Amino acid sequence: MADPSSYRPKPGEIPDSPGVYRFRDEHRRVIYVGKAKSLRQRLANYFQDLAGLHPRTRSMVTTAASVEWTVVSTEVEALQLEYSWIKEYDPRFNVKYRDDKSYPYLAVTMNEEFPRVQVMRGHKKKGVRYFGPYAHAWAIRDTVDLLLRVFPVRTCSAGVFKNAARTGRPCLLGYIGKCSAPCVDRVSAEEHRELAEEFCDFMTGRTNTYIRRLEKQMGEAAEEMEYERAARLRDDVGALKKAMEKNAVVLADATDADLIAVAEDELEAAVQIFHVRGGRVRGQRGWVTDKVEEITTGALVEHALQQLYGEETGDAVPKEVLVPALPDPVEPVQEWLTGRRGSNVSLRIPQRGDKKALMETVQRNAQQALVLHKTKRASDLTTRSRALEEISDALDLDSAPLRIECYDISHLQGDDVVASMVVFEDGLARKSEYRRFQIKGFAGQDDVRSMHEVITRRFRRYLAEKEKTGEWTDGEGTGSAENGDGAENGESPLTNADTLTSADTLTEDDGRPKKFAYPPQLVVVDGGAPQVAAARRALDELGIDDIAVCGLAKRLEEVWLPGDDDPVVLPRTSEGLYLLQRVRDEAHRFAISYQRTKRSKRFRSSPLDDVPGLGDTRKQALLKHFGSLKKLRSATIDQMCEVPGIGRKTAETIAVALARSAPAAPAINTATGEIMEEEPGTMGSSGEPVTMGAPDERRGQET
């Protein structure tokens, strides 16, 4: 625990101007980001007597090891920079709203030549019109099914669309009148886009225009005694009215507004948002957050506004935002919202009438969401805390292992040897920090040696980062980062520490947590005493003695500690054992998935892969032109040049690559004298062709 006075800035160093500040811990990880109208006044509040601070604020300043700040011109700039840094650094002591689900939207892909109506989740894409969010995907599909009678817009995927265009036959929706079938040119691209725009207009609330138009056409058809057409128009009007009934009118003046309500207690807060468009509730969503800092309702509202509109522009930001409490000060937030929309945005508290009544409804939803969240999470929090305490007691640790890293080795009979590293923080998986390794220090199957290599590589990077930040002093340990990846104890150099992420790249002083620079309190290895001894030896060689190590053996689920002749046996009903099993199984799953990926890539390899500059398109063109790799190998340079995109120089390179990979002599069946095909299978020792079966059937089981 750090003393805040040890890093308190000197008097006069902090400017008396707007800005954004960052607290960092001893590992240079950003743990809190804040903004202030006056940096001097705000930061002075953190360096008062610890007894006078809120418990959460006291925890933050004692965890921090340094503070820095950036001066800006206005409070609006401070608001924008604070939002950017919170998104970038993910500070542990900042309020972070978590969606309790991935809400579906009704999306119209206006960025395509033939716009498509579909259900979408996740990040919004440029050029796509979104409506919602909806609580359930089936609600979107019901609405779309009703509207397709009147606005028969394409809903099929790109593959179905191209197949219909190729065959000249539309899909079922095209036959029953719920798609205008632009795939077979029943309507032009311009006519189809006009239909999509009318669909969007109806969804934005301009409904009466289309209903009046259809009713007029229905009357004209009846007068002309076209009763079948009149009946069809009558059904279309009914479908539109039914679709409108799914969203009852809540504000009679066709208001476009978002209503935000907050329900909170000392530890957590729930936020509910109702999206009202054209006076109707078009969407609803909710978030829950831990209150890891001392914060007012107005500040919670401000964070919710940042989360909601931080990446939105234009009409996605409504003209009116109704909230239960205003941020302090409110002017910078309102100015920021106006800038996001491009026109004036009203941010206020409803005082009377329909808007206040609707806000009370949103508030009740927020309160119910908080109660439901606490009901679901109470036992989970208690269980996780008990599990960490049991692990701490069983392994005789100084404190509960809040960060656990687990390692596993996977291979297939010694081929494609890989390793995984998974991370659990506070008993929960932190998948953004998972890492995958290729074993390159040696060839063959040796789980113990592989474990030693992986642990060495991972913690060598940890020491390298400590050295760069000045935390490592000369003479501390025998395996400091100055050794680099060179040879140690006569072993071959551990070079090319490959992972599928950029984790091996050590960035300069950026504060991001997704690196090798943050150490665990406990290292778990999948295996028994030999694997545990290898992991402990790797840490000892690097001079690291403050990280505990244990292993979990699969057979009897025994916990092994370094140097102990007998394992630690936890009760079968132990929550600590259950957590260790989850961590071990997750590491095993992650390693197996990587090993299978590498194996399948190797099985799909081809001599053409070694030709520089030859991409997948031209490979497919060559194989399509010649029919097989064998015929391509026997082709001349001039014949290869006949393939579109293949020049003479490329053809010569292909011929050289194929010649190098050609078999020395054809395989012959000694019983019949028949020359056997060498592709795509292989030959057995008796001359019989061997079929390429599943890897597990041919080589044995994965580990």
Image (cartoon, grey):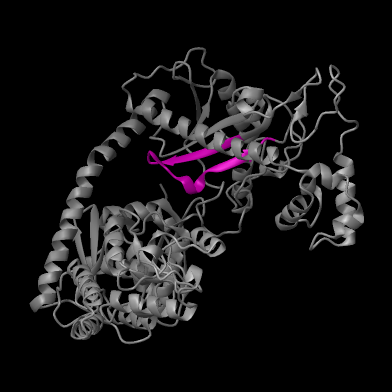
Q: Position of residue 376 (x, y in %)?
A: 23, 43
Give the residue at x 50% y 52%. Answer: 513
Please state which of residues 668 and 130 is positioned toward the viewer in this rendering.
668
Q: Is residue 677 left or right of residue 189?
A: right
Q: Is residue 600 above or below residue 346?
A: above
Residue 190 visible within the image = yes
Q: Position of residue 229 (x, y in %)?
A: 25, 76
Q: Is residue 156 above or below residue 542?
A: below
Residue 435 shown in magenta: yes
Q: Position of residue 493 (x, y in %)?
A: 76, 37
Residue 22 visible within the image = no
**Residue 310 picture quarter:** bottom left
Q: Position of residue 420 (x, y in %)?
A: 56, 37
Give the residue at x 73% y 34%. Answer: 441
Magenta stretch: dominant secondary structure: strand
Please state which of residues 594 and 429 is positioned toward the viewer in this rendering.
594
Q: Which residues are magenta?
A: 419-439
Please state which of residues 435 and 595 is positioned toward the viewer in this rendering.
595
Residue 194 shown in magenta: no
Q: Is residue 436 above or below residue 398?
A: below
**Residue 181 picture quarter:** bottom left
Give the residue at x 59% y 48%. Answer: 466
Quarter of the image containing the C terminus? top right
Give the residue at x 64% y 52%. Answer: 505
